[in-house]
Image: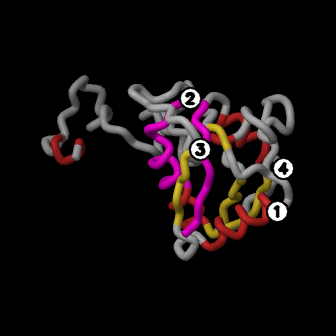
């Protein structure tokens, strides 16, 4: 809706960048982090106007649309990773970088993490590894399109919640 309202694509500050006030989940400059759902950019702060509801929030995903993510989640939980996670935006990029630094890339595949970087570092079972705290997680290769779609949806679904909110994946 915001993009539609900006139909004239004015460059408000004259720096040659159009519509820069609009949110872009893919751009670090615009406050995103390039995926993964941390949603708070480099600061890691809770989004303005966020909510922290009581209890564990169920974040739903289609097992049909994300079959490889679902299998990775099930294997990771079976291996002892917790089902209940806590939003922890600060340091998510550093946790992801540390985890993946020795996991080689493969053409057509992304390295999926469970728990995701935004869900590690605080809470029971989520502080494995130091420098930064909570960098350890399960990693599995999944098709890039599936992982990026899932990461985008995760970010959208977590956006309204404050840091510290408990959540869990639910596949339907």
Label 1 Cα neighbours within 10 Å, binned few <14 / some 14-19 / many ≥20: few
Q: Which residue is mark 4?
A: 102
> Which mark is nearer the camera, 2 or 1?
1
Q: Quadrant of residue 131?
A: top right
Counting from the top left corner in percent of width and height, residue 14 is at: 24, 25
> Which mark is nearer the camera, 1 or 4?
1
**Which mark identifies residue 42?**
2
Q: Closer to the camera, 102 or 68?
A: 68
Does the magenta portion include 166?
Answer: yes
Instruction: Return the disc, 3 or 2, that comes first in the chain's sequence.
Output: 2
Residue at 46% across / 40% down in the picture?
159
Counting from the top left corner in percent of width and height, residue 109 is at: 66, 66
- Distance, label 1 to label 3, CA atoms, is 20 Å
Residues in magenta, as a range = 151-172
Residue 77 shows in this picture: yes
- Distance, label 2 to label 4, CA atoms, is 23 Å
Q: Which residue is mark 3?
A: 56
- Distance, label 2 to label 1, CA atoms, is 32 Å
């Amino acid at each position: 809706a915001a993009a539609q309202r900006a139909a004239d694509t004015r460059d408000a500050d004259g720096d040659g960048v159009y519509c820069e006030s609009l949110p872009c989940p893919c751009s670090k400059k615009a406050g995103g982090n390039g995926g993964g759902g941390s949603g708070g950019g480099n600061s890691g702060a809770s989004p303005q106007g966020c909510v922290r509801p009581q209890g564990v929030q169920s974040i739903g995903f289609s097992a049909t649309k994300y079959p490889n993510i679902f299998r990775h989640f099930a294997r990771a939980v079976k291996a002892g990773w917790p089902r209940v996670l806590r939003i922890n935006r600060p340091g998510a990029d550093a946790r992801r970088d540390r985890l993946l630094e020795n996991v080689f890339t493969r053409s057509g595949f992304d390295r999926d993490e469970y728990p995701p970087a935004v869900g590690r570092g605080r809470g029971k079972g989520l502080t494995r590894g130091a420098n930064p705290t909570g960098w350890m997680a399960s990693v599995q290769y999944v098709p890039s399109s599936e992982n990026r779609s899932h990461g985008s949806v995760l970010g959208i679904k977590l956006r309204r919640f404050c840091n510290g909110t408990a959540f869990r994946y639910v596949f339907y």
